[in-house]
Image (cartoon, grey):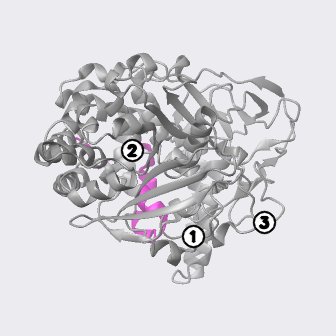
Amino acid sequence: AQVFSNIGLLDNIDIVATTSGSSWFSSQFFFSDQYYSAVVDGTPESLGNFTRVWFEAYASTQADVGTSCGPLQSLCDLASTIPPTNPLSEIVKLIPLMVYFDFSWPNLIFAMFNATSFSYGDTAFVGVDATNANKLNTLEGVDLCFHTSLAPNMRSKDDQTISFLLESPESESAAWTVPLPVDWCVGGAPGEGWTGKFPSEASVYPAPDSWPGSSLIRDFPVYPPTASTSSLFVKPVGNSSGTITMNTAPFGGSPTAVQISAASSSTMGYLSEELVSVFAQYFSLMTAGIGADTSVPENEKLLLLGEIEKVQGLFWESGIMSNLATCSAWTEPDPKDMPGCQTSDYWFYDGGYTDGPSAAMSLGRYQREHGADNEVKLVISNNNFDTNDNDNVLGYFSTPWNQGIAPGEFIWPPGVGSGPSNNPEQSAQIFEEFFDADGFSATFEPVNGTDLSIAFVNATTVDNAAFGVKAGQKVSLAIINLNSDIPTFIVTEPVITGYTPMMVELAETIAGSQDLAVKMKAFASLPEPTPEDTSSATSAFSCFLGMIPVLLGVFFALL
Protein backbone atom coordinates (compact mmCIF):
# COMPACT_ATOMS: atom_id res chain seq x y z
CA ALA A 1 0.00 0.00 0.00
CA GLN A 2 2.81 2.42 0.93
CA VAL A 3 4.72 2.01 -2.30
CA PHE A 4 1.65 2.26 -4.52
CA SER A 5 0.45 5.27 -2.55
CA ASN A 6 3.66 7.11 -3.47
CA ILE A 7 2.42 7.45 -7.03
CA GLY A 8 -1.29 7.35 -6.21
CA LEU A 9 -1.91 4.10 -8.07
CA LEU A 10 -3.27 1.80 -5.39
CA ASP A 11 -6.31 3.91 -4.60
CA ASN A 12 -7.33 3.80 -8.27
CA ILE A 13 -7.18 0.07 -8.94
CA ASP A 14 -10.54 -1.69 -8.87
CA ILE A 15 -9.74 -5.15 -10.21
CA VAL A 16 -6.68 -7.32 -10.69
CA ALA A 17 -7.40 -10.44 -12.73
CA THR A 18 -4.93 -13.21 -13.49
CA THR A 19 -4.85 -16.41 -15.45
CA SER A 20 -2.53 -19.38 -15.83
CA GLY A 21 0.96 -18.82 -14.36
CA SER A 22 0.14 -15.27 -13.31
CA SER A 23 -2.20 -16.75 -10.70
CA TRP A 24 0.80 -18.34 -8.96
CA PHE A 25 1.99 -14.84 -8.16
CA SER A 26 -1.26 -12.97 -7.58
CA SER A 27 -2.29 -15.57 -5.00
CA GLN A 28 0.85 -14.91 -2.98
CA PHE A 29 0.67 -11.16 -3.53
CA PHE A 30 -2.87 -10.94 -2.15
CA PHE A 31 -2.68 -13.56 0.60
CA SER A 32 0.88 -13.43 1.99
CA ASP A 33 2.23 -10.41 3.86
CA GLN A 34 5.76 -11.71 3.48
CA TYR A 35 5.51 -12.11 -0.27
CA TYR A 36 3.83 -8.74 -0.69
CA SER A 37 6.55 -6.98 1.29
CA ALA A 38 9.33 -8.75 -0.57
CA VAL A 39 7.89 -7.68 -3.91
CA VAL A 40 6.96 -4.07 -3.25
CA ASP A 41 9.24 -2.92 -0.41
CA GLY A 42 12.77 -2.33 -1.54
CA THR A 43 14.81 -1.78 -4.68
CA PRO A 44 15.16 -3.42 -8.06
CA GLU A 45 18.18 -5.27 -6.69
CA SER A 46 16.29 -6.64 -3.68
CA LEU A 47 13.49 -7.75 -6.01
CA GLY A 48 16.07 -9.51 -8.18
CA ASN A 49 17.47 -11.32 -5.16
CA PHE A 50 13.98 -12.35 -4.06
CA THR A 51 13.28 -13.64 -7.57
CA ARG A 52 16.46 -15.71 -7.42
CA VAL A 53 15.58 -17.22 -4.04
CA TRP A 54 12.01 -17.98 -5.17
CA PHE A 55 13.10 -19.79 -8.31
CA GLU A 56 15.85 -21.69 -6.51
CA ALA A 57 13.22 -22.96 -4.07
CA TYR A 58 10.96 -23.90 -6.98
CA ALA A 59 13.80 -25.72 -8.75
CA SER A 60 14.55 -27.72 -5.59
CA THR A 61 11.14 -29.41 -5.84
CA GLN A 62 12.18 -31.01 -9.14
CA ALA A 63 15.83 -31.75 -8.41
CA ASP A 64 15.19 -35.47 -7.85
CA VAL A 65 13.18 -36.09 -11.01
CA GLY A 66 14.70 -39.12 -12.70
CA THR A 67 14.47 -40.56 -16.19
CA SER A 68 11.89 -43.27 -15.58
CA CYS A 69 8.71 -43.13 -17.63
CA GLY A 70 6.97 -45.60 -15.33
CA PRO A 71 3.84 -47.09 -16.85
CA LEU A 72 4.37 -45.00 -19.99
CA GLN A 73 7.79 -46.42 -20.81
CA SER A 74 6.49 -47.81 -24.09
CA LEU A 75 5.53 -44.28 -25.11
CA CYS A 76 8.96 -42.93 -24.19
CA ASP A 77 10.54 -45.69 -26.27
CA LEU A 78 8.86 -44.13 -29.29
CA ALA A 79 10.58 -40.78 -28.74
CA SER A 80 13.11 -41.24 -31.53
CA THR A 81 10.36 -41.94 -34.07
CA ILE A 82 8.26 -38.86 -33.29
CA PRO A 83 9.00 -35.78 -35.44
CA PRO A 84 10.28 -32.97 -33.19
CA THR A 85 7.62 -30.65 -34.60
CA ASN A 86 4.84 -32.91 -33.31
CA PRO A 87 3.41 -31.88 -29.90
CA LEU A 88 3.66 -35.50 -28.75
CA SER A 89 7.45 -35.07 -28.77
CA GLU A 90 7.24 -32.41 -26.05
CA ILE A 91 4.78 -34.49 -24.03
CA VAL A 92 7.16 -37.46 -24.03
CA LYS A 93 9.98 -35.27 -22.68
CA LEU A 94 7.82 -34.35 -19.68
CA ILE A 95 6.73 -37.88 -18.73
CA PRO A 96 9.51 -38.38 -16.10
CA LEU A 97 8.31 -35.16 -14.43
CA MET A 98 4.73 -36.47 -14.51
CA VAL A 99 5.86 -39.77 -13.00
CA TYR A 100 7.64 -37.95 -10.16
CA PHE A 101 4.50 -36.01 -9.22
CA ASP A 102 2.22 -39.03 -9.72
CA PHE A 103 0.78 -37.49 -12.89
CA SER A 104 -0.82 -34.72 -10.82
CA TRP A 105 -0.71 -31.00 -11.57
CA PRO A 106 -2.04 -30.24 -8.05
CA ASN A 107 0.89 -32.22 -6.58
CA LEU A 108 3.39 -30.17 -8.58
CA ILE A 109 1.77 -26.85 -7.64
CA PHE A 110 1.48 -27.74 -3.96
CA ALA A 111 5.15 -28.77 -3.85
CA MET A 112 6.15 -25.51 -5.54
CA PHE A 113 4.22 -23.34 -3.08
CA ASN A 114 5.35 -25.42 -0.11
CA ALA A 115 9.00 -24.79 -0.98
CA THR A 116 8.73 -21.18 -2.13
CA SER A 117 6.59 -20.01 0.80
CA PHE A 118 9.11 -21.60 3.17
CA SER A 119 11.88 -19.63 1.42
CA TYR A 120 10.25 -16.31 2.29
CA GLY A 121 9.00 -17.31 5.73
CA ASP A 122 5.27 -17.91 5.25
CA THR A 123 4.76 -21.65 5.69
CA ALA A 124 1.06 -21.13 6.50
CA PHE A 125 0.39 -19.89 2.97
CA VAL A 126 -0.31 -23.36 1.54
CA GLY A 127 -3.38 -23.69 3.78
CA VAL A 128 -4.84 -20.18 3.34
CA ASP A 129 -8.33 -19.95 1.86
CA ALA A 130 -8.67 -17.47 -1.01
CA THR A 131 -11.38 -15.44 0.71
CA ASN A 132 -12.13 -11.84 1.57
CA ALA A 133 -11.28 -12.47 5.21
CA ASN A 134 -7.76 -13.57 4.29
CA LYS A 135 -6.99 -10.91 1.69
CA LEU A 136 -4.31 -8.47 2.86
CA ASN A 137 -5.65 -5.36 4.52
CA THR A 138 -3.24 -3.29 2.45
CA LEU A 139 -5.19 -4.32 -0.65
CA GLU A 140 -8.60 -3.39 0.71
CA GLY A 141 -10.78 -2.08 -2.10
CA VAL A 142 -9.03 -4.08 -4.80
CA ASP A 143 -10.88 -7.07 -6.24
CA LEU A 144 -8.85 -10.13 -7.23
CA CYS A 145 -10.19 -12.55 -9.84
CA PHE A 146 -8.59 -15.87 -10.77
CA HIS A 147 -9.59 -16.92 -14.25
CA THR A 148 -9.95 -20.59 -15.19
CA SER A 149 -11.66 -22.77 -17.80
CA LEU A 150 -14.52 -25.10 -16.86
CA ALA A 151 -14.59 -28.34 -18.86
CA PRO A 152 -17.91 -28.77 -20.73
CA ASN A 153 -18.06 -32.49 -20.00
CA MET A 154 -16.19 -34.87 -17.75
CA ARG A 155 -15.75 -38.55 -17.23
CA SER A 156 -15.73 -40.09 -13.77
CA LYS A 157 -13.57 -43.19 -14.12
CA ASP A 158 -14.67 -44.33 -10.65
CA ASP A 159 -18.35 -44.13 -11.60
CA GLN A 160 -17.88 -45.01 -15.29
CA THR A 161 -20.03 -42.05 -16.33
CA ILE A 162 -19.71 -38.98 -18.49
CA SER A 163 -21.48 -35.82 -17.36
CA PHE A 164 -22.36 -33.31 -20.09
CA LEU A 165 -23.04 -29.81 -18.77
CA LEU A 166 -26.32 -28.44 -20.10
CA GLU A 167 -27.29 -24.99 -21.32
CA SER A 168 -30.42 -25.33 -19.20
CA PRO A 169 -32.04 -28.05 -17.07
CA GLU A 170 -34.92 -28.22 -19.55
CA SER A 171 -32.85 -29.24 -22.57
CA GLU A 172 -30.87 -32.48 -22.52
CA SER A 173 -30.12 -31.98 -26.22
CA ALA A 174 -28.15 -28.77 -25.57
CA ALA A 175 -24.86 -29.90 -24.04
CA TRP A 176 -21.95 -27.46 -24.15
CA THR A 177 -19.20 -28.27 -26.66
CA VAL A 178 -16.60 -25.69 -25.56
CA PRO A 179 -14.94 -24.90 -22.22
CA LEU A 180 -16.61 -22.14 -20.24
CA PRO A 181 -14.88 -19.04 -18.87
CA VAL A 182 -15.31 -18.77 -15.10
CA ASP A 183 -13.64 -16.70 -12.37
CA TRP A 184 -13.20 -17.06 -8.64
CA CYS A 185 -13.27 -13.48 -7.36
CA VAL A 186 -12.49 -12.03 -3.93
CA GLY A 187 -13.58 -8.56 -2.82
CA GLY A 188 -15.95 -5.85 -4.01
CA ALA A 189 -19.69 -5.52 -3.60
CA PRO A 190 -20.42 -9.08 -4.80
CA GLY A 191 -17.95 -10.46 -2.24
CA GLU A 192 -16.20 -13.76 -2.91
CA GLY A 193 -17.61 -16.31 -5.29
CA TRP A 194 -17.72 -17.73 -8.79
CA THR A 195 -18.70 -15.62 -11.79
CA GLY A 196 -19.46 -16.66 -15.35
CA LYS A 197 -21.67 -19.42 -16.69
CA PHE A 198 -21.54 -22.23 -14.16
CA PRO A 199 -24.07 -24.87 -15.30
CA SER A 200 -25.61 -26.68 -12.36
CA GLU A 201 -27.27 -29.45 -14.38
CA ALA A 202 -25.69 -32.23 -16.40
CA SER A 203 -26.95 -35.09 -18.51
CA VAL A 204 -25.24 -38.36 -17.57
CA TYR A 205 -24.22 -41.09 -20.03
CA PRO A 206 -22.39 -44.37 -19.48
CA ALA A 207 -18.65 -44.21 -20.20
CA PRO A 208 -17.24 -46.94 -22.44
CA ASP A 209 -14.37 -49.07 -21.14
CA SER A 210 -12.14 -48.32 -24.12
CA TRP A 211 -11.54 -45.12 -26.05
CA PRO A 212 -14.14 -45.23 -28.79
CA GLY A 213 -12.52 -42.57 -30.95
CA SER A 214 -14.75 -40.06 -32.67
CA SER A 215 -17.98 -42.01 -32.18
CA LEU A 216 -18.32 -40.83 -28.57
CA ILE A 217 -18.19 -37.19 -29.58
CA ARG A 218 -19.47 -37.74 -33.12
CA ASP A 219 -21.32 -34.42 -33.36
CA PHE A 220 -18.85 -32.42 -31.25
CA PRO A 221 -16.48 -30.05 -33.03
CA VAL A 222 -13.05 -31.55 -33.65
CA TYR A 223 -10.35 -30.11 -35.88
CA PRO A 224 -10.92 -29.05 -38.55
CA PRO A 225 -14.46 -28.02 -37.58
CA THR A 226 -17.21 -28.28 -40.14
CA ALA A 227 -20.24 -26.08 -40.64
CA SER A 228 -22.44 -28.74 -39.05
CA THR A 229 -20.30 -29.12 -35.92
CA SER A 230 -19.35 -25.46 -35.35
CA SER A 231 -21.85 -25.04 -32.57
CA LEU A 232 -21.78 -24.29 -28.86
CA PHE A 233 -24.34 -27.02 -28.17
CA VAL A 234 -24.97 -30.59 -29.25
CA LYS A 235 -26.92 -33.68 -28.23
CA PRO A 236 -24.47 -36.36 -27.02
CA VAL A 237 -24.46 -39.76 -28.70
CA GLY A 238 -26.22 -42.62 -26.92
CA ASN A 239 -28.85 -42.92 -24.24
CA SER A 240 -28.79 -40.72 -21.18
CA SER A 241 -29.36 -42.25 -17.77
CA GLY A 242 -30.88 -38.97 -16.61
CA THR A 243 -30.08 -35.47 -15.44
CA ILE A 244 -28.22 -34.67 -12.22
CA THR A 245 -27.45 -31.58 -10.18
CA MET A 246 -23.72 -30.89 -10.01
CA ASN A 247 -21.81 -30.23 -6.80
CA THR A 248 -21.95 -26.45 -7.01
CA ALA A 249 -19.52 -25.87 -4.13
CA PRO A 250 -16.14 -26.67 -5.75
CA PHE A 251 -13.20 -27.29 -3.43
CA GLY A 252 -15.52 -27.59 -0.46
CA GLY A 253 -16.99 -24.11 -0.90
CA SER A 254 -13.96 -21.82 -0.86
CA PRO A 255 -10.74 -22.82 -2.63
CA THR A 256 -7.41 -22.31 -0.99
CA ALA A 257 -5.02 -19.93 -2.72
CA VAL A 258 -3.07 -23.00 -3.88
CA GLN A 259 -6.16 -24.80 -5.21
CA ILE A 260 -7.40 -21.86 -7.27
CA SER A 261 -3.88 -21.24 -8.57
CA ALA A 262 -3.74 -24.86 -9.76
CA ALA A 263 -7.18 -24.62 -11.36
CA SER A 264 -6.21 -21.41 -13.15
CA SER A 265 -2.91 -22.80 -14.45
CA SER A 266 -3.52 -26.46 -15.39
CA THR A 267 -1.82 -25.81 -18.68
CA MET A 268 -1.67 -29.46 -19.79
CA GLY A 269 -5.24 -30.23 -18.75
CA TYR A 270 -6.15 -31.01 -22.36
CA LEU A 271 -4.22 -34.29 -21.91
CA SER A 272 -6.60 -35.40 -19.18
CA GLU A 273 -8.81 -38.10 -20.63
CA GLU A 274 -11.49 -37.08 -18.10
CA LEU A 275 -12.13 -33.88 -20.10
CA VAL A 276 -13.69 -35.93 -22.86
CA SER A 277 -14.31 -33.48 -25.71
CA VAL A 278 -11.31 -31.29 -24.80
CA PHE A 279 -9.12 -34.42 -24.91
CA ALA A 280 -10.53 -35.42 -28.30
CA GLN A 281 -10.19 -31.89 -29.68
CA TYR A 282 -6.53 -31.68 -28.73
CA PHE A 283 -5.66 -35.00 -30.35
CA SER A 284 -7.67 -34.06 -33.45
CA LEU A 285 -5.34 -31.08 -33.84
CA MET A 286 -2.36 -33.39 -33.51
CA THR A 287 -3.60 -35.82 -36.15
CA ALA A 288 -4.58 -32.98 -38.50
CA GLY A 289 -1.07 -31.58 -38.14
CA ILE A 290 0.47 -34.91 -39.05
CA GLY A 291 -1.78 -35.20 -42.07
CA ALA A 292 -0.75 -31.76 -43.29
CA ASP A 293 3.00 -32.28 -42.70
CA THR A 294 4.57 -32.69 -46.15
CA SER A 295 7.96 -33.53 -44.65
CA VAL A 296 6.77 -36.89 -43.30
CA PRO A 297 6.39 -39.84 -45.75
CA GLU A 298 2.90 -41.30 -45.99
CA ASN A 299 3.88 -44.67 -44.54
CA GLU A 300 5.42 -42.98 -41.51
CA LYS A 301 2.30 -40.86 -41.08
CA LEU A 302 0.15 -43.98 -40.91
CA LEU A 303 2.41 -45.52 -38.28
CA LEU A 304 2.45 -42.32 -36.23
CA LEU A 305 -1.32 -41.90 -36.45
CA GLY A 306 -1.70 -45.49 -35.25
CA GLU A 307 0.56 -44.80 -32.27
CA ILE A 308 -1.41 -41.68 -31.36
CA GLU A 309 -4.62 -43.71 -31.40
CA LYS A 310 -2.92 -46.19 -29.04
CA VAL A 311 -1.83 -43.35 -26.77
CA GLN A 312 -5.41 -42.10 -26.50
CA GLY A 313 -6.57 -45.63 -25.70
CA LEU A 314 -3.85 -46.06 -23.07
CA PHE A 315 -4.74 -42.78 -21.36
CA TRP A 316 -8.47 -43.54 -21.45
CA GLU A 317 -8.27 -47.08 -20.13
CA SER A 318 -5.74 -46.30 -17.37
CA GLY A 319 -7.02 -42.85 -16.38
CA ILE A 320 -3.38 -42.00 -15.80
CA MET A 321 -3.50 -38.40 -17.02
CA SER A 322 -6.70 -37.43 -15.21
CA ASN A 323 -5.11 -35.07 -12.67
CA LEU A 324 -3.26 -32.99 -15.21
CA ALA A 325 -6.50 -31.01 -14.91
CA THR A 326 -7.82 -29.90 -11.51
CA CYS A 327 -10.84 -31.61 -9.97
CA SER A 328 -13.28 -29.76 -7.73
CA ALA A 329 -13.29 -32.72 -5.29
CA TRP A 330 -9.94 -31.47 -3.92
CA THR A 331 -10.88 -30.07 -0.50
CA GLU A 332 -7.86 -30.53 1.81
CA PRO A 333 -4.86 -28.23 1.30
CA ASP A 334 -2.46 -31.08 0.44
CA PRO A 335 -3.67 -32.94 -2.66
CA LYS A 336 -1.81 -36.18 -1.89
CA ASP A 337 -4.99 -37.85 -0.61
CA MET A 338 -7.34 -36.09 -3.01
CA PRO A 339 -10.36 -38.26 -3.86
CA GLY A 340 -11.25 -39.12 -7.43
CA CYS A 341 -13.68 -36.93 -9.31
CA GLN A 342 -17.24 -38.20 -9.10
CA THR A 343 -20.12 -37.83 -11.55
CA SER A 344 -21.28 -34.54 -9.99
CA ASP A 345 -17.81 -32.93 -9.72
CA TYR A 346 -16.31 -30.34 -12.07
CA TRP A 347 -12.96 -30.28 -13.84
CA PHE A 348 -10.95 -27.08 -14.42
CA TYR A 349 -7.97 -26.34 -16.60
CA ASP A 350 -5.89 -23.37 -17.77
CA GLY A 351 -7.82 -20.11 -18.05
CA GLY A 352 -5.82 -19.14 -21.11
CA TYR A 353 -8.02 -21.44 -23.19
CA THR A 354 -11.13 -19.30 -22.70
CA ASP A 355 -9.97 -15.72 -22.03
CA GLY A 356 -6.25 -15.25 -22.73
CA PRO A 357 -5.18 -12.35 -20.49
CA SER A 358 -8.52 -12.51 -18.59
CA ALA A 359 -9.68 -9.03 -19.60
CA ALA A 360 -13.13 -9.95 -20.95
CA MET A 361 -14.43 -11.59 -17.76
CA SER A 362 -12.98 -8.79 -15.63
CA LEU A 363 -14.53 -6.03 -17.69
CA GLY A 364 -17.88 -7.78 -17.31
CA ARG A 365 -17.40 -7.81 -13.54
CA TYR A 366 -16.42 -4.14 -13.53
CA GLN A 367 -19.58 -3.22 -15.43
CA ARG A 368 -21.77 -5.18 -13.03
CA GLU A 369 -20.28 -3.27 -10.10
CA HIS A 370 -19.90 0.20 -11.62
CA GLY A 371 -22.05 0.30 -14.76
CA ALA A 372 -20.93 1.01 -18.31
CA ASP A 373 -21.41 4.77 -18.51
CA ASN A 374 -18.04 6.01 -17.28
CA GLU A 375 -14.75 5.72 -19.13
CA VAL A 376 -12.50 2.98 -17.81
CA LYS A 377 -8.77 2.39 -18.13
CA LEU A 378 -7.40 -1.11 -18.56
CA VAL A 379 -3.87 -2.41 -18.43
CA ILE A 380 -3.29 -5.77 -20.10
CA SER A 381 0.05 -7.54 -19.85
CA ASN A 382 0.84 -10.21 -22.38
CA ASN A 383 3.85 -12.51 -22.62
CA ASN A 384 4.91 -12.52 -26.26
CA PHE A 385 7.44 -15.35 -25.96
CA ASP A 386 8.23 -17.13 -29.25
CA THR A 387 5.01 -15.99 -30.88
CA ASN A 388 5.77 -12.75 -32.70
CA ASP A 389 2.05 -12.19 -32.74
CA ASN A 390 -0.65 -10.73 -30.53
CA ASP A 391 -3.44 -13.26 -31.08
CA ASN A 392 -3.95 -13.46 -27.30
CA VAL A 393 -5.09 -9.82 -27.34
CA LEU A 394 -6.31 -9.39 -30.93
CA GLY A 395 -9.33 -11.59 -30.17
CA TYR A 396 -10.71 -8.80 -27.97
CA PHE A 397 -11.11 -6.70 -31.15
CA SER A 398 -12.66 -7.19 -34.56
CA THR A 399 -9.90 -8.94 -36.51
CA PRO A 400 -9.69 -10.95 -39.75
CA TRP A 401 -10.11 -14.32 -38.06
CA ASN A 402 -13.31 -13.47 -36.15
CA GLN A 403 -15.20 -11.84 -39.01
CA GLY A 404 -18.77 -13.06 -39.32
CA ILE A 405 -18.72 -14.50 -35.79
CA ALA A 406 -20.84 -12.71 -33.21
CA PRO A 407 -19.16 -11.96 -29.87
CA GLY A 408 -19.66 -14.92 -27.56
CA GLU A 409 -20.40 -17.36 -30.38
CA PHE A 410 -18.44 -20.44 -31.45
CA ILE A 411 -14.91 -19.87 -32.72
CA TRP A 412 -11.78 -21.98 -33.13
CA PRO A 413 -9.23 -19.17 -32.87
CA PRO A 414 -5.53 -19.17 -33.66
CA GLY A 415 -3.40 -20.11 -30.69
CA VAL A 416 -0.52 -18.30 -29.06
CA GLY A 417 2.20 -18.78 -31.67
CA SER A 418 1.58 -20.76 -34.84
CA GLY A 419 -1.44 -22.93 -35.50
CA PRO A 420 -4.91 -23.04 -33.95
CA SER A 421 -5.74 -23.02 -30.25
CA ASN A 422 -5.99 -26.39 -28.50
CA ASN A 423 -9.78 -26.10 -28.32
CA PRO A 424 -12.67 -24.05 -29.69
CA GLU A 425 -14.21 -21.44 -27.41
CA GLN A 426 -16.67 -18.59 -27.24
CA SER A 427 -15.48 -15.53 -29.09
CA ALA A 428 -13.97 -13.09 -26.58
CA GLN A 429 -14.47 -10.02 -28.76
CA ILE A 430 -15.40 -7.12 -26.46
CA PHE A 431 -14.38 -4.09 -28.57
CA GLU A 432 -15.80 -2.82 -31.86
CA GLU A 433 -12.54 -1.47 -33.33
CA PHE A 434 -10.83 -3.42 -36.13
CA PHE A 435 -7.16 -4.40 -36.14
CA ASP A 436 -5.25 -6.82 -38.32
CA ALA A 437 -1.96 -8.25 -37.04
CA ASP A 438 0.26 -5.69 -38.77
CA GLY A 439 -1.86 -2.73 -37.82
CA PHE A 440 -1.98 -3.83 -34.20
CA SER A 441 1.77 -4.44 -34.01
CA ALA A 442 2.34 -0.94 -35.36
CA THR A 443 0.66 0.59 -32.29
CA PHE A 444 3.45 -0.61 -29.98
CA GLU A 445 6.43 1.47 -28.91
CA PRO A 446 9.48 0.31 -26.94
CA VAL A 447 9.94 0.84 -23.22
CA ASN A 448 13.50 2.09 -23.14
CA GLY A 449 16.04 -0.15 -21.46
CA THR A 450 13.72 -3.18 -21.23
CA ASP A 451 12.33 -6.04 -23.33
CA LEU A 452 8.88 -4.49 -23.01
CA SER A 453 6.82 -2.72 -25.62
CA ILE A 454 3.62 -0.84 -24.92
CA ALA A 455 0.59 0.24 -26.93
CA PHE A 456 -2.05 2.80 -26.00
CA VAL A 457 -5.40 2.16 -27.67
CA ASN A 458 -8.86 3.69 -27.32
CA ALA A 459 -11.81 1.34 -27.75
CA THR A 460 -15.57 0.99 -27.29
CA THR A 461 -17.23 -2.12 -25.94
CA VAL A 462 -19.73 -4.32 -27.77
CA ASP A 463 -22.31 -6.65 -26.25
CA ASN A 464 -20.87 -10.05 -25.34
CA ALA A 465 -23.23 -11.93 -23.04
CA ALA A 466 -20.80 -14.84 -22.65
CA PHE A 467 -18.49 -12.58 -20.66
CA GLY A 468 -21.11 -10.25 -19.21
CA VAL A 469 -19.91 -7.23 -21.22
CA LYS A 470 -22.35 -4.52 -22.35
CA ALA A 471 -21.91 -2.23 -25.34
CA GLY A 472 -21.06 1.46 -25.39
CA GLN A 473 -18.41 1.88 -22.71
CA LYS A 474 -15.34 3.93 -23.63
CA VAL A 475 -12.12 2.16 -22.69
CA SER A 476 -8.52 3.35 -22.73
CA LEU A 477 -6.06 0.48 -22.89
CA ALA A 478 -2.38 0.16 -22.10
CA ILE A 479 -1.18 -3.15 -23.52
CA ILE A 480 2.22 -4.25 -22.28
CA ASN A 481 4.05 -6.96 -24.20
CA LEU A 482 7.01 -8.81 -22.77
CA ASN A 483 9.14 -9.67 -25.79
CA SER A 484 11.50 -12.02 -24.04
CA ASP A 485 13.18 -15.35 -24.73
CA ILE A 486 11.87 -16.64 -21.40
CA PRO A 487 9.04 -19.17 -21.89
CA THR A 488 5.83 -19.09 -19.89
CA PHE A 489 5.99 -22.81 -19.08
CA ILE A 490 9.09 -23.30 -16.93
CA VAL A 491 9.35 -26.83 -15.52
CA THR A 492 12.12 -29.39 -14.77
CA GLU A 493 15.08 -28.45 -12.62
CA PRO A 494 17.56 -27.82 -15.47
CA VAL A 495 15.13 -25.49 -17.25
CA ILE A 496 14.18 -23.60 -14.08
CA THR A 497 17.84 -23.21 -13.06
CA GLY A 498 18.86 -22.23 -16.58
CA TYR A 499 16.32 -19.43 -16.82
CA THR A 500 16.69 -18.10 -13.26
CA PRO A 501 19.53 -15.63 -14.06
CA MET A 502 17.47 -14.26 -16.96
CA MET A 503 14.45 -13.93 -14.68
CA VAL A 504 16.51 -12.05 -12.12
CA GLU A 505 17.92 -9.67 -14.73
CA LEU A 506 14.50 -9.12 -16.25
CA ALA A 507 12.88 -8.38 -12.89
CA GLU A 508 15.61 -5.89 -11.99
CA THR A 509 15.48 -4.21 -15.40
CA ILE A 510 11.72 -3.74 -15.37
CA ALA A 511 11.65 -2.72 -11.70
CA GLY A 512 14.21 -0.02 -12.40
CA SER A 513 12.60 1.31 -15.57
CA GLN A 514 11.95 5.03 -15.28
CA ASP A 515 10.47 5.02 -18.80
CA LEU A 516 7.83 2.46 -17.84
CA ALA A 517 6.91 4.44 -14.72
CA VAL A 518 6.61 7.68 -16.67
CA LYS A 519 4.48 6.10 -19.40
CA MET A 520 2.14 4.41 -16.95
CA LYS A 521 1.72 7.45 -14.73
CA ALA A 522 0.81 9.49 -17.79
CA PHE A 523 -1.66 6.81 -18.93
CA ALA A 524 -3.30 6.63 -15.50
CA SER A 525 -3.32 10.46 -15.21
CA LEU A 526 -1.39 10.26 -11.96
CA PRO A 527 0.52 13.30 -10.66
CA GLU A 528 4.27 13.33 -10.87
CA PRO A 529 5.90 12.38 -7.54
CA THR A 530 7.74 15.01 -5.57
CA PRO A 531 11.56 14.97 -5.88
CA GLU A 532 12.06 13.38 -2.47
CA ASP A 533 9.91 10.32 -3.30
CA THR A 534 10.72 9.85 -7.01
CA SER A 535 13.04 6.89 -6.41
CA SER A 536 10.72 4.86 -4.22
CA ALA A 537 7.70 5.66 -6.37
CA THR A 538 9.42 4.43 -9.51
CA SER A 539 10.59 1.15 -8.00
CA ALA A 540 7.28 0.62 -6.27
CA PHE A 541 5.15 0.80 -9.38
CA SER A 542 7.62 -1.11 -11.47
CA CYS A 543 8.11 -3.80 -8.85
CA PHE A 544 4.53 -4.94 -9.25
CA LEU A 545 4.87 -4.93 -13.01
CA GLY A 546 8.15 -6.74 -12.46
CA MET A 547 6.11 -9.91 -12.09
CA ILE A 548 5.36 -9.72 -15.82
CA PRO A 549 8.15 -12.14 -16.85
CA VAL A 550 6.12 -15.09 -15.63
CA LEU A 551 2.64 -13.73 -16.15
CA LEU A 552 0.43 -14.82 -19.01
CA GLY A 553 -1.91 -11.93 -18.36
CA VAL A 554 -2.78 -9.34 -15.77
CA PHE A 555 -5.63 -6.90 -16.04
CA PHE A 556 -6.30 -3.76 -14.04
CA ALA A 557 -9.39 -1.58 -14.08
CA LEU A 558 -8.67 1.98 -13.07
CA LEU A 559 -11.22 4.70 -12.51
Query: Is disc 2 surrounded by few (<14), some (14 to 19) or many (20+) residues within 10 Å?
Result: many
Tag 3: residue type? Thr
Q: For marks 2 and 3, give the one nearer the viewer.
A: 2
Q: Is residue 84 visible?
A: no
Residue holding disc 2:
22
Residue at position x 34%, y 41% in the image: 9
Tag 2: residue type? Ser
Q: Is residue 415 magenta?
A: no
Tag 1: residue type? Leu
Q: Earlier in the sequence, mark 2 or mark 3?
A: 2
Span of residues in magenta: 64-91
Q: Tell me the distance, in whole angstroms, between the alpha carbons under discs 1 and 2.
A: 39 Å
**Above or below, 392 relative to 264:** below
Q: Is residue 70 left or right of residue 400?
A: left
Q: Residue 332: x percent and y percent?
A: 44, 18
Residue sitting nearer the eye, 101 or 505: 505
Element at badge 3?
Answer: loop
Residue at position x 62%, y 63% in the image: 413
Label annotation for residue 226: 3
